[in-house]
Image: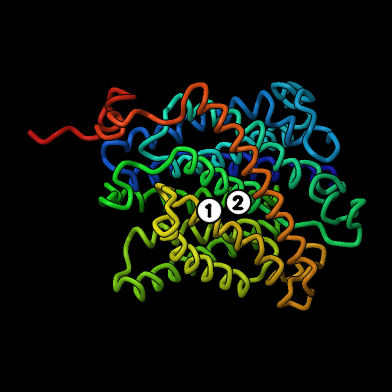
Amino acid sequence: MEDAMAYADGVGALGWLLVSASLVLLMTPALAFFYGGMSRSKSVLNMMMMSFGALGVGMLAWVLFGYSISAGPTVNNLFGEPFSNFGMIDVLNNYAEDPTSVISAGFGATFAIITVALISGSVADRMKFGSWLLFAFIWVVLVYAPVSHWVWGTGTNGEGFDALLGGGGPLFADLPGPYDFAGGTVVHINAGVAGLVLALLLGIRKGFGKEPMRPHNLPFVMLGAALLWFGWFGFNAGSAFAADGYAALAWVNTTTATAVAMLGWLLAEKIRDGKATSLGAASGVVAGLVAITPSCASVDTWGAIVIGFVAGVLSALAVGLKYKLGYDDSLDVVGVHLVSGLWGTLAIGLVASGTINGDAGLFYGGGITLLGVQAAAAAITIVYSAIATLIIGLLIKYTLGLRVSEDVEVSGIDLAVHGETAYEEAK
């Protein structure tokens, strides 16, 4: 009987991961719709191709090196040995004996893919497609995979972030390790910082701040947001690695925070502009999903409500900063992913309810320690992502070049680069 129950549990976990990995993979085509709708009509195909391109090179980068760097034996708590499982051969060779490890490796690939795809929103209308593909491959290997190693790779064994920031490590052994259940630091802060760096390297679009650059297809934006919400259950609930109580808690908290974030964004719009828009609703959904990602299994529903509402309002206000500060983050990667990802990561130190290891946030009687640890993890991610992305971006800028010509930008990347247009002219 015990053997049968253990087998059933194993099959259940395997099935849950297969479904979750498929849901997260769907998020990248969903992002193509979301970003594509927000783009101008002359560059929508290029924008969508950046997501599909990220899917292609991101998977290859993960299989060749990314998985080893993320999950391999640690080298001084900084990264896994890059060739420890080159091509994931050792994992795949055990497909019959340990199928859960195989799909776990694949699950990690879907996270890497969507993370680098998120960055593309900051460079819409002006980055060379070939340079984007090269950047995406290198970034997954040298930026995403090491940060993943710090947080998820071997962090539960006193390595990575645990070694630096608590959890039994040598520096701060008495502190709790930082919490990031499904990717606040690894995915959203990481991608948001990279997006900002690339936007600064590329410079502003021609006409930025002087002529309207409105979304060309709001139904695409709404469809993309809806599919992202659906796929995000694989992201958050799937990160429990089993259909258990943590997965159930993550599902409810994800839905709660996302719904409230949408309302928060619409309220901020209504007060500021007098109108609540469909673009605001879709953007609020994404802001809520981002913010609840790191904390979805460590807060109760009251915490999820606070996280969602603040995320919606903060990001609604933050997306306008690009006009005041002069950086051209085309599709608001910084305003949504960096801002809400940072808020969601820090919020654990405020409203964590103690569901994981009994570590509670400040408002739940846990003191300020956890907040400090969360802030340190966010700061390390910001600094590393900024420096590494800058180096990669500069290398490509002074070799292949980053930006398309002015003529291509003005006429439209779709026709010039891909030889296609999204819409036939009316005859």
Q: Residue at (80%, 68%) from the top-left corner?
A: 369
- Calculate the distance from the C-alpha at mark 1 to the C-alpha at mark 2: 6 Å
Q: Is residue 87 visible?
A: yes
Q: Position of residue 321 (x, y in %)?
A: 44, 59
Side of 413 where 97 appears, left or right: right
Q: Which residue is mark 2?
A: 189
The reply to whether the C-beta atoms of the residues labelled 1 and 2 are less than 8 Å apart is yes
Q: Residue at (72%, 60%) from the top-left corner?
A: 374
Q: Point out which mark residue 337 bears.
A: 1
Element on which disc 2 rests: helix
Q: Is residue 26 visible?
A: no
Give whichever of 311, 389 is nearer the camera. 389
Q: Position of residue 174 (x, y in %)?
A: 91, 62
Give whichever of 124, 53 is nearer the camera. 124
Quarter of the image for the C terminus: give it: top left
Under mark 2, the amino acid is Ile
Side of 105 where 266 appears, left or right: left
- Mark 1 or 2, nearer chain start: 2
Give whichever of 252, 212 is nearer the camera. 212
